[in-house]
């Protein structure tokens, strides 16, 4: 009899960071774990990359040139084709900035200095969740006529 094989799509990660040292550390780490990795140090390129490649996870720094990270987060959350998970990786550890990112809809926030195993664990955790349902930032759930739309704001 023939052998049945499960074909799985390799998950892709887009790294957006202007610090080449951070990229040199993260890129091989996630690549060795089986992810397809694309990186850019130009925040303006992110808009086209999202449209063309539709990465599964975006890891971005909060401090970017030309475009703010907040603008990128809003753009990714408004993207209608796919739910893209967002991790902010930044040396900014100011409560107001962190809360603003979560209010805009990020999935995780990691403060530098980077703990490699922690980053990998967080990426793998996000990768386990399947958000590829029709785009709905509220992740609406409907059962037996009951509709639940979780709304929350961090403050």
Image (cartoon, rainbow, N blue to C red):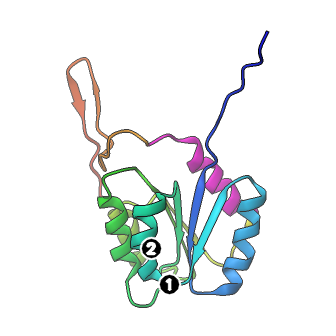
How far across and down, in percent of the image, does residue 9 sit? 61, 43
How far across and down, in percent of the image, does residue 84 sit? 44, 55
In-front residue for pair 46/150: 46
User: Which image quadrant is residue 18 in?
Assistant: bottom right
| Residue on which disc 1 sits | 42
How far across and down, in percent of the image, does residue 28 sit? 76, 68
Q: Is residue 30 left or right of residue 139?
A: right
In-front residue for pair 51/154: 51
In-front residue for pair 37/59: 37
Q: Is residue 154 above or below residue 139?
A: below
Task: Report the span colored magenta.
Answer: 117-131
Q: Residue at x 32, y 46 (%)?
A: 135
Identify the secondary structure beneath mark 2: helix
Classify 10 Å Cα crowding around label 2: few (below 14), some (14-19), many (20 and above).
many
Q: Is residue 1 left or right of residue 16?
A: right
Q: Residue furthest front?
A: 2
The answer to whether marks 2 and 1 mark residues whose Cβ atoms lie closer than 8 Å is yes
Q: Residue at x 77, y 18 (%)?
A: 3
Magenta run includes residue 125: yes
Q: Is residue 34 left or right of residue 63?
A: right
Identify the secondary structure beneath mark 1: loop
Instruction: Name the mark on residue 28.
Output: none
| Residue on which disc 2 sits | 46
Q: Is residue 126 above or below residue 13?
A: above
């Amino acid at each position: 009899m023939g052998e049945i094989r499960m074909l799985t799509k390799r998950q892709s990660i887009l790294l957006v960071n202007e610090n080449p040292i951070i990229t040199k550390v993260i890129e091989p780490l996630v690549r060795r774990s089986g992810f397809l990795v694309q990186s850019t140090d130009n925040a303006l390129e992110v808009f086209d990359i999202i449209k063309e490649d539709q990465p599964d996870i975006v890891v971005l720094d909060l401090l970017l040139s030309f475009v703010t990270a907040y603008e990128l987060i809003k753009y990714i959350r408004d993207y209608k084709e796919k739910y893209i998970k967002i991790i902010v990786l930044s040396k900014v550890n100011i409560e107001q900035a962190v809360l603003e990112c979560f209010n805009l809809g990020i999935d995780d926030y990691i403060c530098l200095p980077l703990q490699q195993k922690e980053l990998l664990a967080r990426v793998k955790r996000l990768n386990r969740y399947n958000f590829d349902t029709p785009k709905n930032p509220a992740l609406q759930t409907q059962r037996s006529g009951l509709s639940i739309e979780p709304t929350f704001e961090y403050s």
